[in-house]
Structure formats: C-alpha cells, structure tokens
Image (spheres, grey):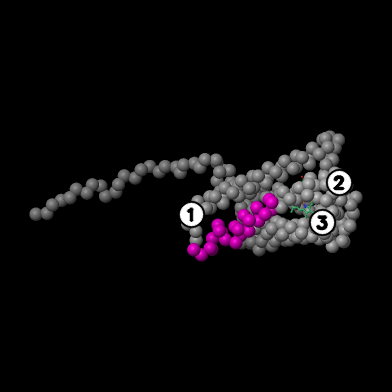
Amino acid sequence: MTATIERGAATAPVPPPTRAPKKPGGFMGSSNGKKAVMAVTGAVMVIFLVAHMLGNLKIFFGRDSFNEYAHALRTLLEPIAPYRTVLTLLEIGLVISLVLHMWAAISLARRAGKARPVKYVAKKSQAGGYTTHIMRFGGLTILLFLIWHLLDLTFGVVNPKGFDSAPADRMIAGFDASRWWVTLLYVVAVAMVGLHLRHGIWSAFQTLGWANRGRYRALRATSGLVSAVLVIGFLAPPLAIMFGVVK
Ligand code: HEM
C-alpha cells in the first residue's frame, strides 16, 4: 500500500508588487542629484577661475592696470549698486558653490564607502583608486591653499605689505624672490587645481551624458586643455614676479 502526502498548491501565492520605497531627500538625496550638484557648482567655480586667471594676467600690463582692475571689481554697477555690492554677491555665490560642492563630494564618498565596506584586494575600482585619492587629497589641499591665499593676497595678514596696500603691491611683494617658498606653494597648489579640474570637468561631461563614443576623445582633450591653460595662466604671474620679469 502506498501513502499519499498532501503537498498543497504547486505555486505559492505571489504577493502584489510593491513600489520601491522612495529615498528621503528626493533628487538632491540621490547619487544622480548629488553628481548634478557637483557639476553645476563645479562649473560656477571654473567660470570664476577663468575670470580670475585672466584678471591676474593684468599684472603684465603694469601695477596701475592691475589696481584699476581690482578697483573695477569693487565698483561694479556703481552708482546703481553701492561700493562692493556686486563683488560681495559674487563672493556669496562662490562660497555657496564651494560648500555645496564639498557636501555632495563627501556624501557621495560616504555612499561609495557603504556600498563597498570590504576593500578590494586589487584596487581596480573607481572608488579607491588613484583618481579618487587625487580628488579627495587634492580637494583638501586646494581648500588649505585657499585659506593661505586669502590671508596673503586678499587680507594681507601674511603679506609683507599688509592689508593697507594696493593689490598690485601685495602681489609683487608676495611673490618676491626672497619668498620663493610661497611661489613653490602656489606651484604645488595650482598643479593640484589642474589635476582636480581635469578629472572634475571630465566627470561633469559624463554626468551630463555628453561623453558618448563619438565625443569621448574630444571631451577628454577639452578637460585636459582647459586645465592646462588655467595652470599656465595662473602660474605665469607668480613665476614672472619671482624671476624679476614683473617688478
Ligand atoms: C596662482 C596664482 C594666483 C594668483 C596670483 C592669485 C591672485 C589673487 C589676488 C591678487 C587676489 C586678491 C584680489 C583683490 O583683492 O582684488 C585673489 C583673490 C582670490 N583668489 Fe586668487 N590667485 C591665484 C590663484 C587662485 C586659485 C588657484 C584659486 C582657487 C582655487 C584662487 C581663488 C581666489 C579667491 C576665492 C579669491 C577671493 C576673491 C574675492 O573675494 O573677491 N586664486 N587672488
């Protein structure tokens, strides 16, 4: 005699599909949102850097030319807007961009760390490789440089000419040959800025979805070219002053 075993239905009832729970924070809380924040704020800072680099080159046309430019920045839209209003608004925009850029970078880095808590044996991944190190370490170096830079050329605290001096005098005294180490500091910092920008601009192109096969090489070359022009343009004044070309 054979016993029969009651097995029940062959297929278990399938529960109705549930929607994936929405992540808190909406678009800005998502990785894509944070990458977009990095791209937009990065673009704002690149525009500032191009303008800043071009402005610095005025030192090659003499102290007066540079001082006039520095004065023009402070008197933009005068008399409609009081002294330094537009410049202050631009500075606020720059600080907001910097803070948002750092916030997005840190939270993306944290997310990458959580997604891969166990380190790769062979470091082939983006999260943990050379580029990541150069971006994180480079970003921090640029931030430290910026503090020194503002104390030096904007507030004159660490500048031989002090605060009560003309911008061109601060610049020329700041990069005097006797302070070669200051120029060296700028060379290192600006090289970091260049590496940071080369990768940053390229990442922004990818975030925007532009870096497809047809444009890959052209956009990679553009990232490199923009960074190289900025590095050369930024380093020309300090080196020219240190070597006595600009007095
Ligand atoms: C290496 C060459 C550079 C030189 C010779 C230079 C020169 C100057 C000078 C003279 C000022 C004061 C302007 C004024 O008082 O009107 C200044 C301000 C400033 N620089 Fe530079 N700079 C250089 C590179 C950079 C880099 C690489 C950055 C950013 C990563 C930067 C960011 C700034 C900022 C944020 C200010 C303050 C702007 C403001 O508040 O209006 N600079 N720089």
Name which residue type carries label 2: Ser
Q: Secondary structure at mark 2?
A: loop
Q: Which of labels 3 and 1 is toward the front?
A: 3
Residues packed near mark 1 inside 10 Å, few (<14), some (14 to 19) or many (20 plus): few
Q: Is residue 136 magenta?
A: yes
Specify the segment rendered in magenta: 121-144
Q: Where's residue 132, x and y in %?
A: 59, 57
Q: Quadrant of residue 222?
A: bottom right
Disc 1 residue type (three-letter):
Pro
**Any mark on residue 175, and which?**
3
SS assignment at label 3 = loop
- Label 3 to label 1, Cα distance in Å? 46 Å
Q: Upstream in the sequence, badge 2 or badge 1?
A: 1
Name the residue beneath numbered marker 1.
117
Residue 134 counted in the magenta span: yes
* Residue 236 lies in quadrant: bottom right
Which quadrant: the C terminus? bottom right
The kind of residue tagged 3 is Phe
Q: Are marks 2 and 1 in contact (CB under 8 Å)?
A: no
Give the camera-side residue of 33 and 136. 136
